[in-house]
Structure formats: C-alpha cells, structure tokens
Amino acid sequence: MKEATTEFEKIQAVSDADYENYIHLKRKEIVDYHLKNNKSYQEFVGKSNSNPESSGWNELPIMTKKDFQKPLSERLSNGFTIKNVYVNKTSGSSGDPFIFAKDKFCHALTWANIINRFGWFGIDFNTSKQARFYGIPLDFIGNKKERLKDFFKNSYRFTIFDLSDEVLERVLLKFQSKKFDYINGYTSSIVLFAKFLQKKNIVLTSVCPSLKCCVVTSEMLFEEDKILMEKQFGVPIVNEYGASELDLIAFQSRNVGTKDEWQVNSETLFVEILDENNNVLPNGKEGRIVITSLYNKAHPFIRYDIGDVGILDEKSTFKKPILKKLIGRTNDIAILPSGKKSPGLTFYYVTKSIIEDDGNVKEFVIKQTKIDTFEVEYVSKNALTEIQIRDIEKAITAYLESGLNFSFIRKEKLTRSKSGKLKQFVSMMK
C-alpha cells in the first residue's frame, strides 16, 4: 500500500499540460505488455484482424464480458497464477458474471484511489466508523470472513436481505448507540432507510451527530431519492460509480460549486464513450462506456465495454474528465409474501450459487412475476442439473424466505433493454 500510495501521488502531480502524454504512454505500455505476456489477449486481438503495431488506439478491438467466459487460469498473463493475484467475482448486475483478477500492485492502487476520494469528505479509513449497507454471505465461513474484514475496516454491517420496518427499527437503535462517521452501501437499501426515517419524522444526525456523509454505490441514484436522503440524514449524499473488476470509476466532486459533479478516475483508468460502431464520440454525446485499466498486468481490461451508457461533460479534460450522465444501473425491490423487502442486489448472493469458473452460465435474469413466484432465465452451455437447482433453492430460502416458487428456463438468448444492458433482477409486480 505504501508503494501504491506513493505512485498514486506521483500520478496526481502530473500537470494538466502533460496529462494527455501520460495517458497515451500508459495506454501503450499496458497494450504492449499484454500483447507480449498474455496469450488470451494475443488471440483476442488476432481474431479481430487488428494490427496494433501499425494501427492506432481506435483500431484496437472492444472487449466485453462475454470475452471472459472461460476459466480464469486461461486469461492470466505470464508469471501470474491464481495464488499470487487478487481474485474476485463480478456482481453479474449486467447479466454476464465472471471471475477476474488484479495483480497486487494494481489492487493496492485501487485502494489508494478509494482512500483518496473518501478523504475529500473527511473520511479516514484508519479511524472513521462506517455504517455499511451491503450483502453478506450466510454460510458460516463466508460470513465470519466478511465480519472479520468489517472489524479491521472499523465497519458495522447491516444485512440488506430484510429491510422491513421491524429490522430498520433495530438499525436506528444502532445509530443511536454508535458514533458512525459515514454510511456506505447499496443505493436502494439506504433509500429504504431514509423513507423509514421520514415516516418517523427523524433526522439521523439528531440521534447520530458524528455522521459526516453518506456514500451510495452500485445502483442508480435518482434525484428525488438524493433529496430525501439529504433531508433525513442531514449530511451530504455522495454518488459513487465503480466496477469491482476495474476500480472506482467516478466520484462526486468535493469542489464548491460542483456539488453534483462526477469526477472520473483518470489516475488508473482511461474512459471513452463510443457509438454502436465503436467510434469515439465527442464529449457531450451519449454512448457506451468503454474503460481501460492502465495498471492491471495480471488480466487485460483494454477498451472494455462495461455494459453502461453515459455522457462525458463537454468541459472534460484528460486530467479531469467529468461524467455528465450515467444511464441504467437501476435495481428493483423485491416484496415477498411475508412483507419482507429485499433489494434486487440480494439476488447477487443467490446467483453466486450458479456462477462457476468453468463459464457454463453465460447470462441470467431473474423476474418476479407474482408475489411468491420468480423465473430464472439463463443462457448456458449445459442445462442446470437437479443438484444445482436444489442448491440454488436452498440459497434462496436462506437469503430470502421459504415458500417461494422458482422456475428455471434455459434460453438461447435473453432480451435486452434499448441500451443493451441486461438487468439481473426485474420486478413485474408494478
């Protein structure tokens, strides 16, 4: 971390005038590295008939989540193994889950970036107490592992799988008894807590005056929800946009007069907006968000289509790109027969049961068709076995409640939205 923090500070010290050259240099370095050391990327570029030696950056092929649907060991660069890299799974919120890796220095740079951005709002990761609204594994080992991480991160985690009023009452009691410095977690879960406070006519800082800010992530933050949270929490609401396989992508600016400005991470990422023909769009135009990880040597993410649509502000520069608008990333709330409310991202923890490194399940969506009935549509090489289905049903009962009906429908292709995004969970109850 010390080495990564020093490197991060060096990057930030590069002047505005020299920043375009910095970006071009890092782009070339990471492409050259993977063309020399990563067989999977060599084959990927070769299939595209692109010649990076003679053509420019814009001729490089676009990577998508589908390109990672094979075992991780086949995607790692020379010198890297599963034992010497950071390994994790994507949430599958776009319907294309996969396992990814970062080399340890790249992973440390990610944390240097996160620590820097949170510091904009007076948050110190070593001392600040976090109220964490995230999911957590329910199996014994996974649960204990996450709880241990929370302990070392000075964090208290509220489970988001049941957000009924009875549970939220207990959440409120925790805020009364603990000196939390900030809230961090899934947007929809925190919005439900704000609505609960609104019903009780309580401003959170009146019972927890140590609170400094609330950082929401993973799902779309609507303006009316932001206004509600600011009123009920009594602190700034900070909008974060990130992807686990990449880094923190954009973070609300701290600058006076730019309260709602999303500053894009230009230190470790290069963000482009492309049209449907992979042409780079000028700032101010809406298109697909394509991102390059400038420091990940273990696993290539070069011109990687993350599955979102957005707009870079006209006043963006190489050093300070501004995300003007993000389109998509919404998750519905599942309302269950018992009255329990669970955010759509709860299904991330359920669908982990069917995410395997062999890349069998390519895509999936879960639809709530009735209050007790759900459909799982999936695309895969092989149909799910009875054992796999039983395991998923057990996970559903553990995370949600018993008595729910699930049907599993294997399809050749899943229906996508106009933006090309595939929502992992859709409620048809409205």
Image (cartoon, rainbow, N blue to C red):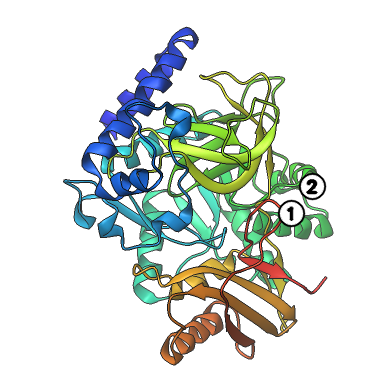
Q: Which of marks 1 and 2 is nearer the N terminus?
A: 1
How many numbered marks does the figure carry? 2
**What's the amino acid at mark 2?**
Leu
State how far apart marks 1 and 2 are (Cα).
Answer: 7 Å
| Picture coordinates of residue 421, whole percent (x, y) | 63, 55
Residue 279 visible from this viewpoint: yes
| Picture coordinates of residue 20, whole percent (x, y) | 46, 16
| Picture coordinates of residue 267, whole percent (x, y) | 44, 27
- Left or right, 177 with respect to 190, comes to left
Q: Residue at x 39, y 33 (%)?
A: 112
Q: Residue 228 carries which label?
A: 2
Q: Mark 1 points at which residue?
A: 194
**Quadrant where the N terminus lies?**
top left
| Picture coordinates of residue 367, whole percent (x, y) | 67, 74
Q: Which residue is drawn at 47% across and 62% down?
A: 97
Q: In the figure, residue 150 lies in which quadrant?
A: bottom left
The crowding category of the residue bearing disc 1, from other C-alpha atoms within 10 Å (few below 14, some 14 to 19, many at least 20), is many
Q: Which mark is residue 303?
A: none
**Mark 1–mark 2 CB contact (< 8 Å):** yes
